[in-house]
Amino acid sequence: MLSERQSMILNAIVDDYIRSAEPVGSRSISKRGDVAFSPATIRNEMADLEELGFLEQPHTSAGRIPSNKGYRYYVDHMAPLKPLKAEDLKLFKQLAAEKLNAVEEVVQHAGTILASMTNYTSILLGPEMFNTSLKHFQLLPLNETTAVAIIVTSTGEVENKTVSIPPGVSASDMERTANLLNAKLSGVPMHMLKARIYSEIGQEIQRHAEHYEQLMKLLDDSLVSGKDQKVFLSGTTNMLIQPEFRDIGKLKTVLDLLEETPTLTRLLNSEQKGIHVRIGSENIHQAFVNCSLITATYSLDGESFGTIGILGPTRMEYAKVIGTLDLLSRAMSRALTGRYGP
Amino acid sequence: MLSERQSMILNAIVDDYIRSAEPVGSRSISKRGDVAFSPATIRNEMADLEELGFLEQPHTSAGRIPSNKGYRYYVDHMAPLKPLKAEDLKLFKQLAAEKLNAVEEVVQHAGTILASMTNYTSILLGPEMFNTSLKHFQLLPLNETTAVAIIVTSTGEVENKTVSIPPGVSASDMERTANLLNAKLSGVPMHMLKARIYSEIGQEIQRHAEHYEQLMKLLDDSLVSGKDQKVFLSGTTNMLIQPEFRDIGKLKTVLDLLEETPTLTRLLNSEQKGIHVRIGSENIHQAFVNCSLITATYSLDGESFGTIGILGPTRMEYAKVIGTLDLLSRAMSRALTGRYGP
DNA sequence: GTTAGCACTCTATCTGAATGAGTGCTAAAC
DNA sequence: GTTTAGCACTCATTCAGATAGAGTGCTAAC
């Protein structure tokens, strides 16, 4: 599609612009050394690249900046990932070495590392409930009317929810029901739990307890997990140092969206396994038109498990971020795998 | 200290400045109507007020703006609180009426209301562990080396922590220990728990289990609550719309601090019961020199329980915010009291 | 096909003048 | 003695016009 030379020039422009955030002119490309042509020749090619939609010109007498299409080409034809600096690698090793017990701690820590290494904003999704199974269930009465339901998953995640006790249900009813659940359904994947309750222990409850309907309602309430995936943000204020967000209006649109965890979950989750890059308007959400979002997935025992992402301006250090995400997602998978064996 | 007229003029200036964020001149004060003197007279008084340290002048030919001391005087001599708008009151009633089961839900919801009503940033501290007592304790092994410890407090708060199982400790050891704790120490205030473990059940454990040292270590690990008070932020992006934070540098200092939950906890907790106003440099932390922080405490069954706060520029609508905080803290106390009775 | 040269365009920057908000001081009026 | 009108003065903001400089597009020569 693009000639060798056009490709080189486009690359050089994107590279320069990522560094400087200023429109790039023909002269500065010529002086870089890696494109050994005169400014005039480069100008001709730049005009062609603009016509093809890879470059844009803020105004007639300015240099060129990459368009979304230009970034896309750059990313798709990028040179193989650069190895990371030694000091960065050290951080990853720490992540694996550190005795972090809970999955959430690993995820949170990874997010902090990611943000501080890239100077962008990191968005990580915690474990997907879908892939974990029930370890333990408990119903603990607090007073006459409310109880707290506690669910522990196979990965040690603890979810709790305060629920109302339906009238007529006694403490011993609740205890018996919880015991039944633990005895029969421990190890069942979370996403099948509700169905299995009806099919396998409904009858049992009916036989032993008076208030079948109420107890089932109570279980239903207890197992509605409000937020099934936790969102961990880090480095949100890194957004402020990007010159493209000097404009407070644009900045606010993005930061506002970062507070909407359900939307974030949706945006990150739409990805399949592996690394994905969404540039500018490739993002579904309006607020991200000036941003690029790069995501990767991490896994536990081979099962896809959660997502880690970096949000920054479209003028992003793609090579560095993709390399970092790749390594970090692997490091996380390594840190998590083999700990909660079947 | 200040004459009647000086006080009136200072009040008018602060009022005007809070509304406009622009230095206010003698003419505009004279035209307001509530200070019936000529601009010249007002100018003289303003010069005096500046000499006394209540006002400042950005430059010679500009109007005056209140100094921290000026704000302080304004707050201390403020007219009695204005009644809130009917629509705002409705929100409070909703808070009380809504069937929010868990304490945390009440706190979180209150934070959202607070931020949206004031257009500032709300910072709320969840229940202080100090004032709750132990309801239930559980140690659940996940695999050979790790277990999850779950603590439920009298208010239904659930804390969990993943801990390493010391070598030699068996599942039945852990179960027995947890049962012992529940039998002997249920109802004991959280802040006395550690001491009581040593004094009351240490011997018991020593008698029944082989690995006394290891078990005590395990309990110790389990009960170290990393973050004892949760911090709920809402409306952080409201900071962006304040003209005093047009300067990204200043903005970043504040937003960065908002991400440091431990520091926030410390800053809010330093207050005693009731409403407190910290203006500009009255805040201990450097990052808040351009901010005012207003806090109030809420309680459960009369016991002081947590703190709610509003952070904004020193040019803050003190009357409105103080009134709102006062009512909301009462509404929260009402919504929480009598639910987890002894 | 490549490049040197040049006219042209457009932004950013600087200058100086005009504007206007606001002050401080003095002297007159109350 | 207190208040106010009047006036000279200060300083930030705004605007227009001039200038510099970066960069382009086109043409013609290599």
Image (cartoon, coloured by chain):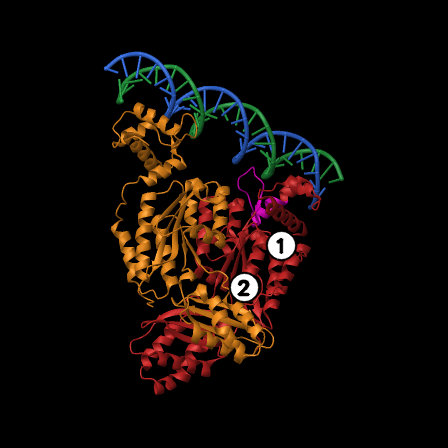
Chain colours: A orange, B red, C green, D blue
Q: Residue B66's spot in the image, x, y percent? A: 57, 48
Q: What residue would you read off at disc 2?
A: B105
Q: Which residues are magenta?
A: B45-65
Compared with A85, B154 (above or below) is below
Query: In the rendered view of the protein, which quadrant contains the N terminus of chain B?
Result: bottom right
Amino acid on which the number 1 mark rests in the picture: Lys
**Is label 2 or label 1 in front?**
2
Q: Residue A295's spot in the image, x, y percent? A: 38, 50
The local crowd at label 1, few if under 14, some if 14 to 19, many if 20 or more residues have their Cα within 10 Å, is: some
Q: Secondary structure at mark 1?
A: helix
Amino acid on which the number 2 mark rests in the picture: Glu
Mark 2 or mark 1, earlier in chain: 2
Q: Residue at x 47, y 62 (%)?
A: B265
> Spatial distance from mark 2 to mark 1, Cα to Cα?
25 Å
Say which of B299 and B162 sits in front. B162
Q: Residue at x 51, y 47 (%)?
A: B240
Query: Are the residues flagged by discs 2 and 1 from a single subunit?
Result: yes
Task: Please state if D13 lies on the left or on the right of B32 as rendered.
Answer: left
Q: Is residue B277 visible?
A: no
Say which of B102 and B309 sits in front. B102
Callouts 2 and 1 close, C-beta under 8 Å: no
Q: Residue B111's spot in the image, x, y percent? A: 55, 59
Q: Residue at x 43, y 74 (%)?
A: A184
Q: What residue would you read off at disc 1?
A: B320
Compared with B53, B222 (above or below) is below
Task: Please state if B130 lies on the left or on the right of A169 as rendered.
Answer: left
Q: Secondary structure at mark 2?
A: helix
Task: Please state if A205 lies on the left or on the right of A31 as rendered.
Answer: right
